[in-house]
Amino acid sequence: MDRFNYKSWSTNQLILLTEVDNHKVMFDGYEYIWWNNIEGEWKRHCLLNYSNHKKAISHLRYCLNIWDKELNKRRNKIERKQFFIDMGTHFKSQEKIRKTANSSLPTIEKINFIRLENPNTTKHQVCELLGIKPSIYYRHLRTLKSRGTLLSA
């Protein structure tokens, strides 16, 4: 594995690399050596030694900044991908609800299906979608509860 290329690190390794506690710079009597701890043991991070501690710290600071940017980019990419997956699922659910609302099923079954498909749908949305009054909505809910056939997610 190329220890110098930030894209060669896995996301878990990048998380560990961005934590300052997983780095140390030690003086061996002649030069400064940069060590990191990403796999449970301290390993030499850089093949080159540093002539003074300022160069070592500056290189560490620079690398931490690069790894931080790469980690944030990866996290944003994952979050963005999940957002669009969730959005697609939501649209498919909305299509099912719309088809059911326009179907020839009895209103009581439509209400039951809509509540099962999307439990976050408000009574006002259901009433508007089905073109019914809230009193009819509540009457159907009472009927479903009394029958014991009210579906719930």
Image: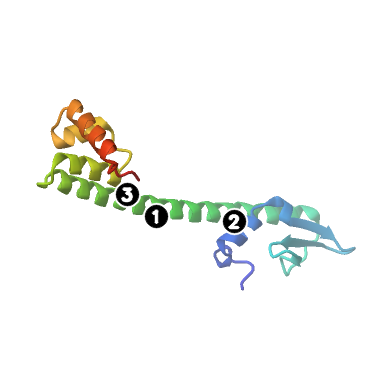
Q: Where does the image place residue 137, in percent across and percent down from the top left? A: 20, 31
Find residue 73 and report its horizontal and vertical position in percent.
49, 53
Label 2 vs 3, first from the N-terminus: 2
- In the image, which disc is placed on residue 67? 2
Badge 3 or badge 1: first in the primary sequence: 1
Q: Quadrant of the C terminus?
A: top left
Task: Please tell me how crowded label 1 is: few (under 14), some (14-19), or many (20+) other residues with Cα within 10 Å.
Answer: few
Left or right: 96 with respect to 148?
Answer: left
Q: Residue furthest right?
A: 29
Q: Where in the figure is residue 122, as x and y percent of width and height?
A: 28, 33
Relative to 101, 120 lies left or right? right
Left or right: where does residue 22 sit relative to residue 102? right
Give the mark, 1 or 2, whose residue is nearer the N terminus. Answer: 2
- Residues at circles 3 and 1 in contact by the CB criterion of under 8 Å: no
Residue position for label 1:
81
* Residue 93, placed above or below residue 14: above
62 versus 8 height, above or below? above
Observer-side mark, 1 or 2, equals 1
Q: Residue at x 17, y 36 (%)?
A: 129
- For label 2, the SS is helix
Res. 112 image quadrant: top left
Quarter placement of the N terminus: bottom right
Disc 2 marks a residue whose amino acid type is Trp
Which is more foreground, mark 3 or mark 1? 3
Spatial CA span between label 2 and label 3: 30 Å
